[in-house]
Amino acid sequence: MSTKPEMCAVERLGAVRNQLEAAAKAAGRASGETILIAVSKTFDAGHIEPVLEAGHMDFGENRVQEALGKWPDLKVKYPNIKLHLIGPLQSNKTKDAVALFDVIHSIDRSKIARVVADEMARQGRTLELFVQVNTGEEPQKAGVMPTEVKSFVAQCREEFGLTIQGLMCIPPADEEPAIHFAFLAKLATECGLQGLSMGMSGDFETAIRFGASHVRVGSAIFGSRD
Ligand SMILES: *Cc1c(COP(=O)(O)O)cnc(C)c1O
């Protein structure tokens, strides 16, 4: 393999694409049904730009502050970029997040839903929104509890006028992800939602089998983060 990290990322992206297509085919799905988000957190513009040059436009970041340091310039150069916020959002970062991102995967409480709704109206922007669900009910993890998803999605719609695209989860590290993907899919069906943001480097093929609309793949594309 090349020692140039930028070549590695493009090569790895190609390999991940092939795996995604094979997984979709095996599941009887069209590969175009699943959006591959290249998670570029901790990697700088120098690592990201070759992937953009290769034509990939969907990227994920987990921190607003870090994203502000690299994406505004890249968005000028590549206007078709679609930027996904996949990490927790604080209300004091909402203005920047709504201006920079196109999709937020981590709507997880009423306060944030309300502030995002207000900020989208103020900026005249419409972002795609996912509700993060704490499917493993882990105390340290963000996300709405499974029993509260239905009422929270209803509140987002009725009280804040938001369109929710789907649900997102990060399964507990030590549990079989398939169980959580199946559970998230069931919750989404109950809420009448199509979108399923689930699956990372280690389990995106499983997520595709359970109907993922978006997979979030970092280290398998950009290499390990240390
Ligand atoms: C970092 C991150 C990913 C990507 O993780 P990898 O294991 O590197 O693919 C996906 N989703 C979220 C929410 C993340 O924070």
Image (spheres, helix red, strand yellow):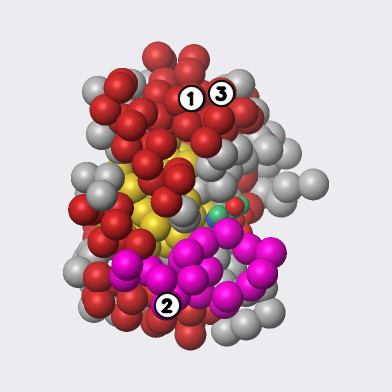
User: Mark 1 or mark 2, which is nearer to you?
Assistant: 2
Which residue in the structure is indicated by mark 3?
Answer: 68
Asked if the residue under mark 1 is in contact with the one under mark 3, i.e. CB atoms within 8 Å, the reply is yes
Q: Viewer-proximal residue, 52 or 114? A: 114
- Mark 3 or mark 2, which has the lower sequence index? 3
Q: Residue at x 25, y 70 (%)?
A: 191
**Which SS class for mark 3?**
helix
Q: Viewer-proximal residue, 48 or 103? A: 103
Question: Residue flagged by tag 1: what amino acid is it?
Answer: Asp
Q: Position of residue 122 (x, y in %)?
A: 30, 22
172 horizontally vs 124: left or right: right
Q: Residue at x 67, y 49 (%)?
A: 223
> Please, is residue 118 above or below residue 152 in the view?
above
Which residue in the structure is indicated by mark 2?
Answer: 147
Residue 30 badge: none
Residue 96 badge: 1
